[in-house]
Amino acid sequence: MPDALTLLSRRRSVGPAFLQGPGPDAAELETLLRLASRVPDHGKLAPWRFVVFQGDARQRAGEIALKIRLEDNPVLDEAGQGAERARFSRSPLVVAVVSRAGPHVKVPEWEQVLSAGASAMALEIAAAALGFASTWLTEWIAYDARFRAAIGLAEHERIAGFVHIGRAKVAPEDRPRPALADIVSYF
């Protein structure tokens, strides 16, 4: 089996709780982002961009999440507060894949959104190819306009996902996959 097929057949999400450092260095991060930008992009619009959370930025983002959560739930218990504070610190690197899809005369918005999703998946595959583990999450913060504004997103921008990247603490087990007979039809 060619290397790319082996990589794809073994790719498995590893949750943030099971990721550890070291994360990608500067050159590896540049490679990851460059490869994540090489996805189908009808009209060459680049309808996505990346926000990188590493080092102290992870703690700052967690504090923003906590502040917003406390606005909504002022009696949030200590465990909940700790979870929000640590939301971006659970892995060495978090990359927000931001969809900036919008109306266009030739390229439907749906195609632009799909391109952002393809970018997130390419980021996960590139991370695996470099020997890292990752997971693609959204969680409540992706859908909160206050959080999106606080991290610098424009009003029309949406978070396609947060890709957490690090080293797997333990080898991930595979999970059952759907039988092709259940998901494939022929016209």
Image: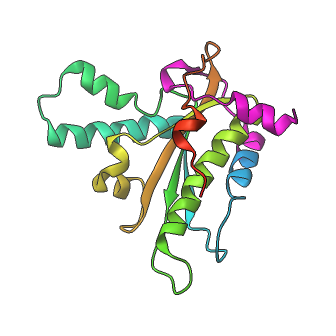
Instruction: Say which residue appears at 23% left-offset and 39% top-offset.
Output: 69
Q: In the picture, which quadrant includes the N terminus?
A: top right
The image quadrant of residue 124 is: top right
Question: Relative to 105, is 37 above or below?
Answer: above
Q: Nearest the camera: 35 or 174? A: 174
Q: Does 18 lie within the magenta span?
A: yes
Question: Relative to 79, is 182 above or below?
Answer: below
Would residue 155 appear left or right of 135 to someone viewing this image? left
Q: Nearest the camera: 2 or 64? A: 2
Q: Position of residue 37 (x, y in %)?
A: 68, 58
The image quadrant of residue 83 is: top left
Is residue 158 shown to the viewer in this render?
yes
Instruction: Say which residue appears at 50% left-offset and 76% top-offset.
Output: 108
Question: Relative to 142, is 157 above or below?
Answer: below
Q: Which residues are magenta?
A: 1-29
Is residue 93 shown to the viewer in this render?
no
Q: Position of residue 161 (x, y in %)?
A: 48, 47
Residue sticking out furthest to the top: 170
Q: In the picture, which quadrant includes the C terminus?
A: bottom right
Q: Does 34 lie within the magenta span?
A: no
Instruction: Say which residue appears at 54% left-offset and 19% top-offset.
Output: 18
The image quadrant of residue 127 is: top right
Residue sticking out furthest to the left: 75
Instruction: Say which residue appears at 57% left-offset and 29% top-offset.
Output: 13
Q: How many marks?
A: 0
Q: Position of residue 103 (x, y in %)?
A: 45, 79
Would residue 150 appear left or right of 160 to someone viewing this image? left
Q: Position of residue 134 (x, y in %)?
A: 60, 32
Model colouring: rainbow
